[in-house]
Image (tube, rainbow, N blue to C red):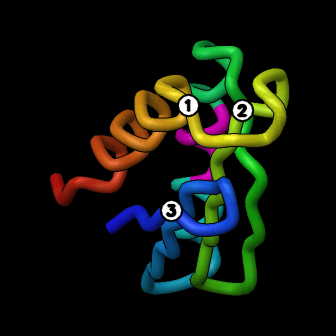
Amino acid sequence: MWQEKDHQLHRAFRFADFKEAFAFMTKVALVAEKMDHHPTWTNTYNQVDIYLSTHSAGNVVTEKDHRLAAAIDKLHEPS
């Protein structure tokens, strides 16, 4: 579940291993590039933390962030 804190949307994702985490990040990168809206994120082994805010709007959460969050959620849905 995404949470808004300090003018950012944040969600932590956990995977079975690094390979799955990195594959997820690759999928997110392709969607983010297509939307021209790029996340701030970290990856440590099987965990990916994603932070969304709109830099051009003064680093606050906007509709662009909510749209990207929804797209990321779709990528994370079980197949």
x, y percentage for residue 56?
83, 22
| Label 3 secondary element | strand
Q: Main secondary structure of the magenta part?
A: helix
Kindly identify the amino acid type of the residue bearing the numbered disc 2: Thr
- Residue 11 location (% of width, % of height): 49, 67
As helix, strand or loop, the secondary structure at mark 1 comes to loop
Q: Is residue 20 above or below residue 71?
A: below
Give the distance between the C-alpha atoms of the residues marked 3 and 1, in whole angstroms.
Answer: 11 Å
CB of mark 1 within 8 Å of CB of mark 2? yes
Rendering quarter of residue 6: bottom right
- Report the quarter where the N terminus lies: bottom left
Q: Is residue 13 above or below residue 72?
A: below
Residue 66 as seen in the image, left or right of residue 45 = left
The residue singled out by tag 1 in the image is 62
Question: Disc 1 or 2, which lies upstream in sequence?
Answer: 2
Question: Which residue is tagged 2?
Answer: 54
Q: Is residue 69 magenta?
A: no
Q: Residue at x 74, y 60 (%)?
A: 41
Q: CA distance from mark 2 to mark 3?
A: 13 Å
Q: Earlier in the sequence, mark 3 or mark 1?
A: 3
